[in-house]
Amino acid sequence: MKLTTLFASAAVALGLATTAMAEDKTKVGFVFVGPIGDGGWTYEHNKGREAVEAEFGDKVETVYVENVAEGPDAERVMTQMALDGADLIFTTSFGYMDATNNVAAKFPKVKFEHATGYKRLHPNVSTYSARFYEGRAIQGHIAGNMTKSNIIGYIASFPIPEVIRGINSAYIHAAKVNPDVEFKIIWVYTWFDPAKEADAAKALIEQGADVVLQHTDSTAPQAAAQEAGNVVTFGQASDMGQYAPFPRVSSIIDDWAPYYIARTRAVMDGTWESMDTWDGIGPGMVGIGEISDAVPAEVKEEALAMKAALADGSYHAFTGPLNKQDGSAWLAEGETADDGTLAGMNFYVEGITGEIPQ
Amino acid sequence: MIRLEKRPQPSRAFSYATPLLAVLATFFFGGLLFAALGKDPIASILTIFWEPLFGEFSFFYRPQLLIKGAPLVLIAIGLSLGFKAGIWNIGAEGQYIMGALFGAGVGLAFYPTESMFIFPAMVLAGAFGGWIWAMIPAVLKVKFGTNEILVSLMLVYVAEQFLASMSLGLLKNPEGFGFPGSRNLQQYPSAHNAELITGSGMHWGVVMALIAVIFAYVLFERHRLGFAIRVTGEAPRAAKFSGVNPSRLVLFCLGTSGMLAGLAGLFEAAGPAGQITIDFNVGYGFTAIIVAFLGRLHPVGIVLAGLLMALTYIGGDIAQSQLGLPAAAIQVFQGMLLFFLLAFDLFTNYRLRFGRTETA
């Protein structure tokens, strides 16, 4: 019992301390699931952290812990940051969802921002994610044009809505320009494992794929494609520009910097509120990396036009007519998907073969 | 010339001094590493070892030591039984996963019924899950003479596939919007392995670890079976002549270590972690191998080693956020500990001789 009291009073004291030191530095913590040098997901989040430092200079202090396992370890690291006086904590993995909400309950004065989750159980928790599927639409368009074997390989991480959305979006736009296209999907059950990703890429290439898309974060598939020769790839999460102009012909870039800066500013101004943010190409959370000259000029032009239309909202990546895999109708002519369906997407669209693993 | 000479008798003094020397050498070379990274070495080591125990927020970190240390100790105790007898269970990670799946599966099957019998049933199921997974390499070894190191290790990867399948399928939270992962058992009172005293870090897994330590101590010091394990490890032929049945020993050692690993998994899934997710296992089963050896395969040593490893994890994370030390540097630091332990271990059986090499 004594410990609880101690804990509570420390939390209160900290709350007081942070308000008292409000003139002082704003402390922003980041909890990372991978190493900051992964060249993908965590790398981009860390660039967002650096952007916060660059923007606010000595008004802000950022701290981070990398390679934090999901579960009790994440909960401990978040608590530790809150105890050390963090005002705002970004937790950058889906698996941190329950831990973020548990810790938020104990530190009501500290603001928490959880990436890609949906639970906001306390008024000091926000969630944010990016509409990566918009980038997938552009990838699909380029991929459908580039493939000669009509087989596109897809390295998928986990069968969760975000990944399924990406597969659907890429397929719809590849099939639109090339109705003969076929997707071969390998599930690797990891976000970052260079060895597994390389194996998957090689397996896909052996099965005849001459375009490999990846929803995993390492550059291993790029290296495998480079070795194979005539295989096209796209950078994932980060630009992966070291493999441009070929095999990497473009990329989806997660740009967290504007969001991180805006939320840090909100904490400084005292205007921070709990909310759910799901931004795409328009607000700049999803970036499309330089489309290289390996892509024919007219395809590049079409891709850039699609990017502009997605950005200004005149085109939605999921626009009917679209059927589900089993042939049942999903979206009527001209109808666009609502966010609720997209957020929980657990089905393939018509034309994709294979089943979503259960 | 310097050369190694085998001691006629293993040095008792060295076998006790080794862990201490290893820790000191790790401090020294770890300090050099931190200094090379441009960090104050003394401050870094103090942050890792002092801050969690006696720092400003030690009221929070001390209970965390129990939470982090309990599964390590529980698994390492089981492993030490086999390791002493030369039976190498490398697959505790897999048994840990299966224990969690069986235990949490039983709990989730009863959801949302509330009953005081649910948690005990989960504990039994967790122990069974770990045990049955360890019986696979045990039976294969006894019947067909397969290598238990390979079989138990490979089964870790099979268990990981089961874990992924369960998180995405059978055990998936029906209210989770299609996301992988089970319901959170922390929100299901009958199945929750809650702290026994709030804020103390004491949950049933910690209690079970202490029971296992006492059990192992009594087994080795007072029981015939403990003697049989030791003799088998030190002199297998002599053990056979003295009537030890090697097959039964394999079944007992692998079964018990699997059971304890399974229990560790269940207590973790029902308590601190709260749910079955694809990334539920974080390497306790492998780290426990280090803990078992760092603790000299002795029950009390294992407790100390488990707490020390837990301390380096917790302190390491603090050092990352307070001092900006990279995670890789902390991992190197932990690796040094094992490296120096093995290096100094050599001197238990060998000593250094200075002087001229004798010609043969």
Image (cartoon, rainbow, N blue to C red):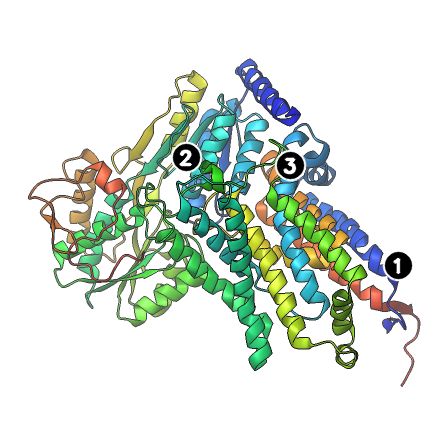
Q: Which residue is mark 3?
A: B63
Give the chain of mark 2. A
Residue kind at label 2, given as amino acid type:
His
Q: Quadrant of the C terminus of chain B?
A: bottom right
| Residue B177 badge | none
Q: Quadrant of the N terminus of chain B?
A: bottom right
SS at badge 1 = helix
Give the chain of mark 1. B
Instruction: From the top left corner, tell me how far across and down residue B133 is, in percent.
Output: 52, 64
Q: Which residue is mark 2?
A: A114
Q: CA distance from mark 1 to mark 2?
A: 52 Å
Between tags 1 and 2, which lies in front?
1
Above or below residue A309? Residue B145 is below
Would you call the spot at circle 3 few (<14 residues within 10 Å), some (14-19), or many (20 or more)? some
Residue B76 lies in quadrant? bottom right
Q: Which residue is mark 1?
A: B13
Q: CA distance from mark 2 to mark 3?
A: 26 Å
Residue kind at label 3, given as amino acid type:
Pro
Above or below residue A59? Residue A100 is below
Please give left or right for residue A127 compared with residue B48 in the image: left
Same chain shared by disc 3 and disc 1 = yes
Q: Is residue A351 visible?
A: yes
